[in-house]
Image (cartoon, rainbow, N blue to C red):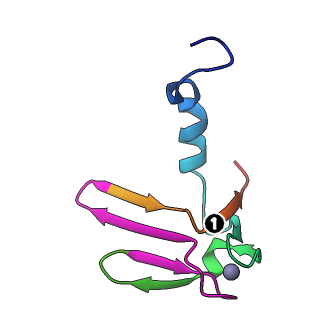
Amino acid sequence: MDELMQDGNAIAGLLQEVFAAEMTTAVGTCGNCASAGPVGAAHLYRGAGIVLRCPHCGNTPAKIVKRDSRIWVDLRGIRTLEFTV
Ligand SMILES: [Zn+2]
């Protein structure tokens, strides 16, 4: 590794900043229809986990499963997230 190629530990502080931010007011862009809006406006469904659906096309921007002290997050349905830190 050199200064241009490091491992993820090099951005530990940035990751803490990103994942501690208020997310309901973050503006997400749907990976399917490209609509943008606050995460808090997404439709929420509860089952074995949490599923957030785009209110415009029904895409699933986020799936979250929490079990005991572990959390799994699937964000493959979201194109971008924009928020203030
Ligand atoms: Zn959508």
Q: Quadrant of residue 42?
A: bottom right
Which residue is rendered at x = 44% and y = 85% of the image? 45
Identity of the residue drawn at 22% across and 59% down:
68
Identify the residue at horizontal 53%, vertical 40% (top origin): 16
Locate residue 81: give its quadrant: bottom right
Q: Is residue 69 above or below residue 5?
A: below
**Amino acid at dot 1:** Ile
**Where is mark 1, residue-wise?**
78
Q: Which residue range is magenta in the image?
A: 50-70
Q: Quadrant of ligand 1?
A: bottom right
Give the secondary structure at mark 1.
Answer: strand
Position of residue 64 in the picture relative to residue 7 (left or right): left
Q: Position of residue 80 (x, y in %)?
A: 70, 60
* Residue 16 vs residue 47, the one in the foreground: 47
Task: Count the labels in the image.
Answer: 1
Residue 62, image x and y in percent?
52, 69
Ligand 1 within 8 Å of disc 1? The answer is no
Residue 67 belongs to magenta span: yes
Asked where in the image residue 25 lies, by quadrant, the reply is bottom right
The image shows residue 58 at horizontal and vertical percentages of: 60, 87
Question: Is 74 or 24 nearer to us in this picture?
Answer: 74
Residue situated furthest left in the rendering: 68
Percent of width and height locating residue 67: 25, 63
**Is residue 76 located in the magenta-colored stretch of the structure?**
no
